[in-house]
Image: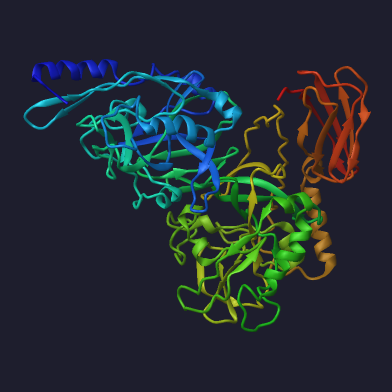
Amino acid sequence: MIKLKKCLAMFMAGALIMTGGILPQESKANAAGDYGISNPRVENGVTTWDKIKFGSYYQDAEFEPEPIKWRVLSVDGDDAFLLADKCLDCKPYNEEYTDVTWETCTLRKWLNEDFYNEAFDSEEKAAITETTVINNETIYNDGEDEYITKDGNDTKDNVYLLSIDEVCNTAYGFNAEFSEAYETRYVKVTDYVKVNGADYENGYWWLRSPGDFSNYASCVNFYGFGDNCGCYADNAVRPALHINISSSKVKDAGEVDSEGNVTEQADGIGTPRVKDGVTTWDCVYFGNYKQNAEWRKQDVEWRVLSVNGNDAFLLADRNLNCKPYNEENIDVTWETCTLRKWLNEEFYNEAFDAEEKSAIIETKVINDDNPCYDTDGGNDTKDNVYLLSIDEACNSAYGFDSEFDRETDADSDENPKTRYSKNTDYTILFNGAGTVSGPGYKNNGNWWLRSTGFNGTYASFVYHTGYGEYKGKSVNAGNYVVRPALHINLSSSEWSKAGTISANNQIKAEPIEEPDDYGNKPDVPTQVPTPPYGNTGNNLKGVKQASQTANTVQKQTTDGIAAKTLKLKGVKCIAGSKKITGKVSLSKAKVKIKVGSRAYKKAAVKGKKFTLRLGYKLRKNTKVTIKVTKKGCKGIVKQYKVKQI
């Protein structure tokens, strides 16, 4: 460490500002937008970063690799500068307590060898841009004099750490003062890091810049305050790198802000979000179940309550049936009730085919005691399909009002519309669901929760007003409806986007058609609106009356809506392949395929899947036309281009 005269120190500080670490070029907003990611932005003093998933590394306490999430510090054309969203390991800056620089430290060697080979496969490595890393000197002021610590040579690295200059760069979303605590530099550590020696939640993380002495290195402490530490200390490691954002290995991971608020994103769907007091959920189609007055199966629409990696927690958008919680009025819990058995057997087998079942994640369901009456919730269960609990139905992270038993008028701004749920026509007409015609509540249902009520013969539920009832209703009560919940694996091709829905007026927005991995645009099923029946009472009496109502519904509906619309899913026409494959939304449909100017050929159909085998290899950009027909359904014709992958 060398003592400097103050005038020289001021000059050096100015030089550092001009020549510091890897400074971003002027952002290219249009280029960033091409990939759907942006540079950090600040609003009302809060910084928000976009996130992506790239590579995988140990993050939980079980040493299982998981996708790494990175914050986007800058985007310049195809180049994205990334910083790990969490600290990924715990290592000394150097394994010996000696004079050291970034060029010579053991942490640099570990990042560019062990971590690089562990975290990235060959395709991901190809997307990483080797970076010329500028290693500036560090100036230290003790209140009287200023000192400088030598920096070492510049380096070329695939993976590295941020410098003091970079962690004070406002263009990257950080605050400009290094020696003050700021939330923009807060970072959590993974469970894996804790197992490896970090006994804290917020990270105390290394920077590559030298510290006050040549055997020290700079770091950021738990509070976002710039600091320095002896190089042999075990601090957290938060890697940074540059990648080519056009790589197919890059996946959207939502965004995070400096206050710790996270919006997860997976395959174009995200967690619920609130704007101006209104909750909006993304929706997906998954499975088929009877929903209209003609008993026809239709795609089931689900609201996305949460996304965690490839796991999506879903809740049916509408009430799909009307069943008692238990067929007898006896003491029961969720574990022993007949509704659980029905959901996991009859409904499960009716609504999902074999491939959809393979996408459903069996869930360990926690059955807590009633929070108001302390009624025993019974044993925890493992279910494929289940109902929400009281705690889940007032979890704001899932988009619900946090006050379970709030009761207000329908037109009140405080009304918990987040728990409104409409009955399907099938639920109303043929299963005895009571309906409501009052202003603001039309066709809303009273839907069961799995939590016990004030004793073992009662189960909790949500009123049609959105009010949660702790006391519950007799378990054998009629007119109460079923709103299933489940978890699915988003890596499955069995689901599709279904737009969004908002709590204020339950308006459905259709999804924007985006191409899949092969450049094909998905078909969006036509929505079948609930007709305005008004108050039909608790039950329609007799099959004749139900039939008459069904006929009325049919007359009120155009042929285009009443007819089942076929959909194509997962069509693959790949350059070099000798076959074209895909799936139709309904089984036993007729599929004909034309390649280029050749004549149509009939594809082999097995269930919902189809395959057309060719006597030649497909060529890139060749047009493929697929025609699908089925008796009683509206046929479709879709065009695709052969893609090179």
Q: Position of residue 67 (x, y in %)?
A: 54, 40
Question: In the drawing, does residue 600 fall left or right of residue 412?
Answer: right
Judge whether residue 620 can be spotted in this image.
yes
Question: In the drawing, does residue 376 fall left or right of residue 156?
Answer: right
Asked if residue 645 is positioned above or below residue 367 in the image, the reply reads: above
**Quarter placement of the C terminus:** top right
Using the image as rendered, state which of residue 574 and residue 403 is in the foreground: 574
Q: Position of residue 596 (x, y in %)?
A: 85, 18
Asked if residue 250 is positioned above or below residue 63 in the image, the reply reads: above
Q: Position of residue 125 (x, y in %)?
A: 55, 27
Question: In the drawing, does residue 643 fall left or right of residue 234?
Answer: right
Please report the residue visible at 76 percent of the width from the left and 68 percent of the height from the top: 540
Asked if residue 91 is positioned above or below residue 208 in the image, the reply reads: below
Q: Quick one: which residue is furthest to the left in this view?
A: 144
Asked if residue 178 is positioned above or below residue 496 in the image, the reply reads: above
Please report the residue visible at 51 percent of the width from the left and 55 percent of the height from the top: 418
